[in-house]
Image (tube, rainbow, N blue to C red):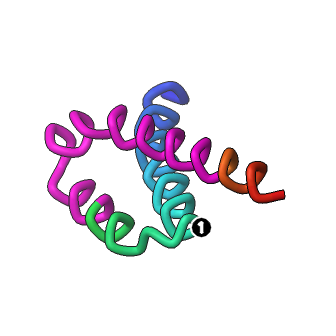
Amino acid sequence: MLDAMTSCREPAVQLEAMVTTLHTLKRFGMSQAVTELAQQGPPAYQGTQTILGSLLKAEMAEREVRSVATR
């Protein structure tokens, strides 16, 4: 029972984390698009979740490199 509840919560937590990260990066349009995509249901959102996560990591890494380079 606990495993089923945890697995149901994980996508919502991941969505919240992704939306929060996008807001932090001032990617408000992407944040709204991710929210709308998640509302469409599991096939559409789950298919893009890995790609979006990779893009967020790359964006954060690039910003960190630029930040260090300007110091």
Q: Residue at x 69, y 49 (%)?
A: 64
Q: Nearer the viewer, residue 9 or 52?
A: 52
Name the dominant secondary structure of the magenta segment: helix
Q: In which quarter of the view is residue 29 placed?
A: bottom left
Q: Secondary structure at mark 1?
A: helix
Q: Amino acid at mark 1?
A: Thr
Tell me: 4 left or right of 68: left
| Image location of residue 2, percent across then percent down | 54, 29
Label 1 belongs to which residue?
24
Would residue 11 be counted in the magenta stretch?
Answer: no
Compared to 22, does 4 lie above or below? above
**What residue is drawn where x is 66% and y is 52%?**
66
- State whether residue 13 is above or below residue 51: below
Front-lying residue, 36 or 69: 69
Quick one: 5 or 57, which is closer to the camera? 57
Residue 24 lies left or right of residue 11; in this view the side is: right
Q: Quadrant of residue 47?
A: top left
Q: x and y percent of residue 59 in the render? A: 51, 48
- Segment tinted magenta in the rendering: 34-63
Q: Residue at x 57, y 46 (%)?
A: 62
Residue furthest out toward the right: 71
Q: Quadrant of residue 7?
A: top left
Question: Disc count in the image?
Answer: 1
Q: Residue at x 68, y 45 (%)?
A: 65
Taking the magenta stretch, the answer to whether it contains residue 52 is yes
Label 1 crowd (10 A; few <14 / some 14-19 / many >=20): few
Residue 53 screen position, x and y as percent: 44, 39
Q: Is residue 20 left or right of residue 51?
A: right
Q: Return the x and y of residue 57 as percentages of the image width and height.
A: 53, 40
